[in-house]
Amino acid sequence: MAVGGNDDMERDLDARLRLAPAPAAAAAAASPTAAGGGGGIAFRAPQEQFTVSDFELGKIYGVGSYSKVVRAKKKDTGNVYALKIMDKKFITKENKISYVKMERIVLDQLDHPGVIRLFFTFQDTYSLYMALESCEGGELFNQIVRVGVTQLTMWKIYFLSLLLMQGLCLQKGRLPEDEARFYAAEIIDILEYLHSVGLIHRDVKPENLLLTSDGHIKIADFGSVKPTKDTPIKVLPNSTNERACTFVGTAAYVPPEVLNSAPATFGNDLWALGCTLYQMLSGSSPFKDASEWLIFQRIIARDLKFPEYFSDDARDLIDKLLDVDPSKRPGAGPNGYVSLKKHPFFRGVDWQNIRKAQAPKLAMEANANEDDDSQDSNWLSHMRSTPVNQQVSSVGNNGASSSSEVCSHVSILASIDSFDSRWQDFLEHGESVVLISKLKKINKLTNKKVQLILTDKPQLICVDPAKMVAKGNIMWSDDPSELNVQVANSSHFRICTPKKVSTFEDAKQRAWQWKKAIEDLQRCQKN
Ligand SMILES: Nc1ncnc2c1ncn2[C@@H]1O[C@H](COP(=O)(O)OP(=O)(O)OP(=O)(O)O)[C@@H](O)[C@H]1O
């Protein structure tokens, strides 16, 4: 069924999103063929006719800026995938079509044990789906964090995760040097492969470096990939030129030359590798600050300080990877990866057999004793048989979760929001943001844009984003009979208090996340 019955719009959207397979080649599709020239594409990973109801959906692995990734078991085969779900309207509105296409085409052709495999794709009226190889070990980011929190109580973990997601935590988990060395070596093995096929990843960071169940690294998220002119990988026409000077990636890992609009080079990924190694060893990225603008100032000034406990070899390697001249970073020069692998930090690494080596033990997830798929069952039960955009909620609080589920879930929800110092003025000292969205507040006669901020105090603050003035709070209560959220569909929800009902539209389809975050905080407050 077309959205709003607007068939023309549907057709136009479909045409823009479509990557039609070449009719003759689609069936065979064993090896990649030309994608340029506007013709069809023969995909290794086929476009299937599946629907989301062919899968049992489990926990959310993660939420990206234009997707959510969910554990999904195919009902007939029992095979488990990481299903990347992308809302068509959102992708179009946010201008992410080229990112989606690029990721689809590039992933389809890559073949390395350290690169997430794409198995197949499908779509329905509302969403695009990519069935990816599932990485059960989670993000490298969490591995770093968890090492530091395994000794803490759940309550402390909750507050720690709130602080972490704001980038404000001073003491975090960090990895022993041997473990960091292992992961860095696997990342280098992956980057060497990507660079050898003329691809610059451009978003290397611990959130995109995933761990398999046996603890090996795989890189994900190829939406920002930049092909070089001579890449043997087939890419969309013009993609070797477009976005040459655009800032893509993540603020904390972006190299100074990108901030100066220099064209992308392999050196971009090597800088991000240096930042990632620093983060593994210290628990923080090297240029951390309270806002993107301040982070950029630090990067441009190369305001780099090493903790005392870094070994000389680690310090030297990071210092070289974070050279302001991208061509001087080890791995980028004419000697390529030879010089990087020979660095004393990697003494003893068996580069030929790195993927066969014993990986560091996975740090236990905070709720590792829970059944894997139970964590988000309240939410996902609504998704199992209906497309994500068609979910209809029952009213109010629909099920009890344990406090550990609740508190770890809050951190998952909140991690999708980057810290933005503009909203600090509306917070009290020491107060942190749990969830923040620009929403449309729907009134009877007019709709108004508001910035809704949920904090750990907790409070629900409404701000007029144009005037940057507070428009009053929604009265908080830990009691669901006095404060509850009703979700109509993934973009519309109501916050109900005895005095007032406020209706919101979230273009980023986070209605369920708002409900969950508020309910989770209510439960956390009670415990
Ligand atoms: N194959 C996978 N297995 C397990 N988890 C995954 C997998 N792919 C992605 N994830 C999780 O989902 C998150 C979002 O995925 P991804 O980065 O691909 O989305 P995105 O919308 O492209 O995000 P970004 O904002 O980084 O561009 C990841 O950070 C990770 O936690």
Image (spheres, rainbow, N blue to C red):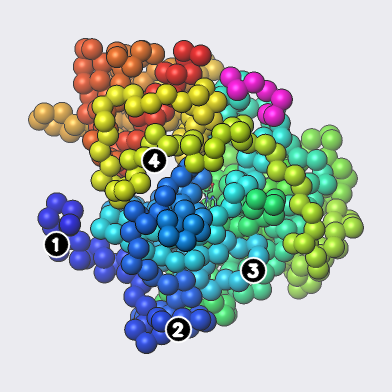
Magenta span of residues: 149-155
Calculate the distance from the C-alpha at mark 4 to the C-alpha at mark 1. Answer: 29 Å
Residue under pointer 3: 112
Calculate the distance from the C-alpha at mark 4 to the C-alpha at mark 2. Answer: 36 Å
Q: Earlier in the sequence, mark 2 or mark 3?
A: 2
Q: Earlier in the sequence, mark 1 or mark 2?
A: 1
Quarter of the image where the N terminus is located: bottom left
Residue under pointer 2: 28
Find numbered disc 2 in the image and state the secondary structure of the residue it sits on.
helix
What's the residue type where badge 4 is placed? Leu
Find numbered disc 1 in the image and state the secondary structure of the residue it sits on.
helix
Foreground pick, 197 / 389: 389
What's the residue type where badge 3 is placed? His
Q: Is mark 2 within 8 Å of ligand 1?
A: no
Residue under pointer 4: 380
Based on the picture, tell me whether residue 150 belongs to the magenta stretch. yes
Foreground pick, 456 / 342: 456
Q: Where is residue 199 shown, x and y percent of the image?
A: 58, 69
Calculate the distance from the C-alpha at mark 3 to the C-alpha at mark 1. Answer: 41 Å
Q: Nearer the viewer, mark 4 or mark 1?
A: 4
